[in-house]
Amino acid sequence: MKTPLWFPQSFFARTLWLVLIVVLFSKALTLVYLLMNEDVLVDRQYSHGVALTLRAYWAADE
């Protein structure tokens, strides 16, 4: 069976394509996760910012 012309012929090229596909799949899953949990992540970041602001306020001289 002949492989299509667009399919890489060398082992290195096939491995490179496999790594590229896995990385892009991982990025897509990360994007979906971030979009589904955006409200939780924003709340956590906001709470962290408020905590840092309060700590700086308490540490400052009057």
Image (cartoon, rainbow, N blue to C red):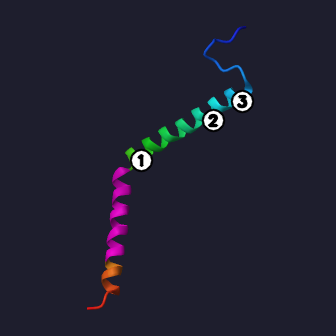
Compared across the picture, whether 30 is left or right of 2 comes to: left
Q: Is residue 8 above or below residue 27?
A: above
The boundaries of the magenta stretch are 38-53
Magenta span contains residue 60: no
Compared across the picture, whether 61 is left or right of 4 comes to: left
Residue tagged 1: 34
Q: Is residue 53 above or below residue 13?
A: below
Amino acid type at circle 1 is Leu
Q: Mark 1, mark 3: which one is toward the viewer?
A: 3
Which quadrant of the figure contains the N terminus?
top right
Amino acid type at circle 2 is Val
Q: Residue furthest bottom?
A: 62
Q: Residues within 10 Å of mark 2 (few under 14, many from 20)?
A: few
* SS under mark 1: helix
Q: Mark 2, mark 1: which one is toward the viewer?
A: 2
* SS under mark 2: helix
Comes first in the chain, label 2 or label 1: 2
Amino acid type at circle 3 is Phe
Comes first in the chain, label 2 or label 3: 3
Comes first in the chain, label 1 or label 3: 3
Q: Position of residue 39 (x, y in %)?
A: 33, 53
Q: Residue at x 34, y 80 (%)?
A: 56
Residue tagged 2: 19
